Image (tube, rainbow, N blue to C red):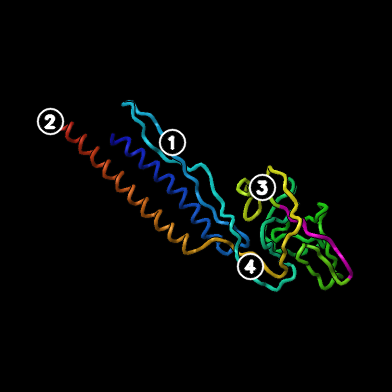
Amino acid sequence: MIENSNFVGLSHQMALRRQMDIIANNIANINTTAFRGERVLFEEFLIPTSEGRKISYVQDVGLVRDLNEGQLLTTGNPLDVAIAGKGFFVVETPVGPRYTRNGNFTVNDKGVLVTADGRPLLDEDNRTIKIEATDSDVTIAGDGSITAASGPIARLQVVSFGNEQRLKKQGGTVYSSAEPPTPVKNPRIVQGALEKSNVQPIVEMTQMIEVLRNYQSTQRLVDTNHDLQRKAVEKISRPT
């Protein structure tokens, strides 16, 4: 019975360690543009014993993403763009289209509109967007249309998904999806602004303290069971 208690305790500690890693990652991305916090999804599973009973263990089976929007931060940079509401920008990668809400855009040395990590943005016709050095007064309208003093340039492609929880993170704030995207007919684009991370520092710190206390409590239980085992062995091995 004591051995089973140790296994249950270790199972709990492993789950808490995983939860702590996720909380730490959330805190580390408090200042990451358009980052969305995550939570661990736990599940109970029962293991039958030789006595015919079942012991309850816990394991983490996945992550739940916080889909709430982050606050908009006004930057004044004409190539900073935020989505107010649902939707993702579409970017080109060697392995196919990827999706992000991080609108910290710039123009590379080839005149292509790219993300901060160099991925080209795609327009509604799945083409890269070129902004020439001679294009002045670049404006991005609420529907994603990009114009310059010389005339229209392109329109940002904004898409949505039926279940955003199924999006797979590909690093940072970029996602992939096995589900075909749906074009957002009336996107709400804000030029000169960025979406902040939706991580709430106070909530994360409170959860971190709670996880730490639970881990320490479980460790005390494991230590107590270990002492009981040691005393039992000593008692059995003591000569009569």
Secondary structure type for disc 4:
strand
| Span highlighted in magenta in the image | 150-159
Q: Earlier in the sequence, mark 4 or mark 2?
A: 4
Residue depicted at x 20% and y 35%:
232
Q: In front of the other: label 3 or label 1?
A: 3
**Residue 153 part of the magenta segment:** yes
* x and y, in percent, of residue 212 in the image: 39, 54
Q: Which amino acid does the dot numbered 2 rest on?
A: Pro
Q: Which amino acid does the dot numbered 3 rest on?
A: Gly
Q: Earlier in the sequence, mark 1 or mark 2?
A: 1
Q: Quadrant of the N terminus?
A: top left
Q: Which mark is residue 239?
A: 2
**Residue 197 part of the magenta segment:** no
Q: Are marks 1 and 4 in contact (CB under 8 Å)?
A: no
Q: Are marks 3 and 1 in contact (CB under 8 Å)?
A: no
Above or below — where is 28 with respect to 18?
A: below
Q: Earlier in the sequence, mark 1 or mark 4?
A: 1
Residue depicted at x 89% and y 70%:
150
Q: Which mark is residue 45?
A: 1
Q: Are marks 1 and 2 in contact (CB under 8 Å)?
A: no
Q: Earlier in the sequence, mark 2 or mark 3?
A: 3
* x and y, in percent, of residue 173 in the image: 63, 55
Reading the image, the residue beneath label 4 is 72
CA separation in Å, label 3 and label 4:
24 Å
Q: Is residue 29 visible?
A: yes
CA separation in Å, label 2 and label 3:
71 Å
CA separation in Å, label 3 and label 1:
30 Å
Residue depicted at x 18% and y 31%:
236
